[in-house]
Amino acid sequence: MALLHDRRVRYVLAGGVSSGTYYGVFWIGWLLTAGGVPYLALALAANITTALLTYPLYRQRVFRASVPVLRGLFRFYLTSLGGLAFMLAGLPVLVQVAHVPVLAAQAALLCAQPLINYQVLRLWAFHVRPPTPTYPDTDGQPVPPALTAGTPG
């Protein structure tokens, strides 16, 4: 279980849950509608559903982030929108140009997306900047570091 201390391992596991959730929503929608709903609309529905269901997993288990919930969710979903753009651009190419069946095309794109998202999530969506250090002034009140340049601390 020492592997679970590695964020990259937790990310891969969460990515499996995320991809499974996305593909499950897409697949069920595709089968239930018998292709009556455009696959790009199903990709949008699967994207929104997956983002809402997996955000707590990424926030709490993968990145163990302390960012405010709504700010983190907003950034997480912006990252998900990037993934959606990737899907919306890639699906028509694979389905209409390369004649790959819809479900197979969706599965192929799902394999590439996590490689892109990891760095964006780690460095932006769940990144917390350390607090700016302050130094007490002679009256005990903190002074921003820019005003204390050259002053012994």
Image: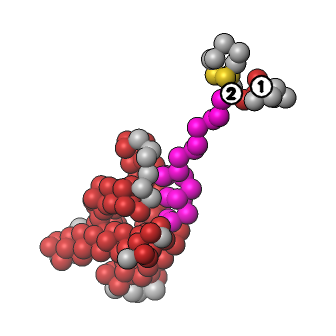
In percent of width and height, residue 78 lies at 45, 52
Q: Quadrant of residue 38?
A: bottom left
Left or right, 94 with reference to 153: left
In percent of width and height, residue 145 lies at 72, 29
Q: Quick one: quadrant of the N terminus?
A: bottom left
In the image, is residue 120 part of the stretch drawn in magenta? yes
Residue 137 in sight from this viewpoint: yes
The residue located at (66%, 13%) in the rendering is 139
Q: Element at badge 1?
A: helix
Left or right, 91 with reference to 54: right
In the image, is residue 63 part of the stretch drawn in magenta? no
Q: Amino acid type of disc 2?
A: Tyr
Q: Are discs 1 and 2 less than 8 Å apart at CB?
A: yes
The residue located at (58%, 43%) in the rendering is 130
State which tag comes first along the sequence, 1 or 2: 2
Give the magenta part as a residue range.
117-135
Residue at the top extreme of this rendering: 139
In percent of width and height, residue 87 lies at 43, 69
Task: Examine the rendered structure and indicate whether residue 60 appears above or below residue 134.
Answer: below
Q: Which residue is mark 1?
A: 148
Q: Amino acid type of disc 1?
A: Thr
Q: Which residue is mark 2?
A: 135
Left or right, 152 with reference to 85: right
Residue 86 in sight from this viewpoint: no
* Few, some or many residues within 10 Å of mark 2 (<14, 14–19, 20+): some
Residue at the right extreme of this rendering: 150
In percent of width and height, residue 44 lies at 33, 61
Q: Quick one: quadrant of the C terminus?
A: top right
Q: Is 81 in front, or is 31?
A: 81
Q: Is 64 in front, or is 35?
A: 64
Mark 1–mark 2 Cα distance, whole angstroms, equals: 8 Å
